[in-house]
Amino acid sequence: MAAKGLIVFQSGYGPEETMNRFEDGVRARGMTIFAHIDHAASAASAGLVLDPSDLLIFGNAQDTTALMQKAQTIGIDLPLKALVWQDPSGVTWLSYDDLAWVAERHGLDPEADATLNDLSALLAALARAATRAT
């Protein structure tokens, strides 16, 4: 189901609660939320129908700037993004870019591994907390 370069978690919650839980986790870790884009609401305003689809754009300048200092083109893929969406059968998913794939795309050298590993672990922890019932 996942496109190349994406990590996908199935959620035990609906789209709104999944996004709320993810957003709460981002804020709790002191990260900045730059934008929240409700694609379904945008589609509705154009008279179109789209299953729930919300994009959160967020980040931490300290970590992402360190990556950009090594490969400035990675800025096209930053800040970080997470998409919460519901498929036609009603299943909710949370997806985000696989940072290893992003790093490879921009030719990052092994020097960036510590930052990438830390961010990858953080994204996975945020996704698990947002999608798994406690």
Image: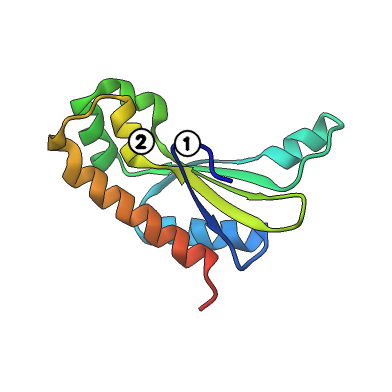
In the figure, residue 66 lies in which quadrant? top left
At label 2, counting other C-alpha atoms closer than 10 Å, the crowd grade (few under 14, some 14-19, many 20 or more) is few
Left or right? Give the position of 24 relative to 48: left
Q: Residue shown at 84%/33% (left/top)?
A: 48
Q: Residue shown at 77%/50% (left/top)?
A: 88
For the residues labelled 1 and 2, say whether their Cβ atoms are less than 8 Å apart: yes
Can you name the residue that lies furthest to the bottom here?
134
Q: Residue shown at 40%/24% (left/top)?
A: 76
Question: Against 41, is 109 above or below?
Answer: above
* Mark seen at residue 4: 1
Question: Against 117, is 101 above or below?
Answer: above
Question: Against 127, is 84 above or below?
Answer: above
Pinpoint residue 36: horizontal percent, then vertical percent.
57, 43
Indicate how the structure is coloured in the image: rainbow
Amino acid carrying mark 1 in the image = Lys
Amino acid carrying mark 2 in the image = Trp
Can you name the residue that lies furthest to the right here?
47
Pinpoint residue 41: horizontal percent, then vertical percent.
75, 40
Report the Cα–Cα distance between label 1 and label 2: 8 Å
Q: Residue shown at 39%/42% (left/top)?
A: 98
At label 1, counting other C-alpha atoms closer than 10 Å, the crowd grade (few under 14, some 14-19, many 20 or more) is few
Mark 1 or 2, nearer chain start: 1
In the picture of the structure, the residue carrying the numbered disc 2 is 101
Left or right? Give the position of 76 relative to 56: left
Pinpoint residue 112: horizontal percent, then vertical percent.
18, 37
Can you name the residue that lies furthest to the left here?
111
Tag 1 secondary structure: loop
Left or right? Give the position of 61 relative to 77: left
In the figure, residue 27 lies in which quadrant? bottom left
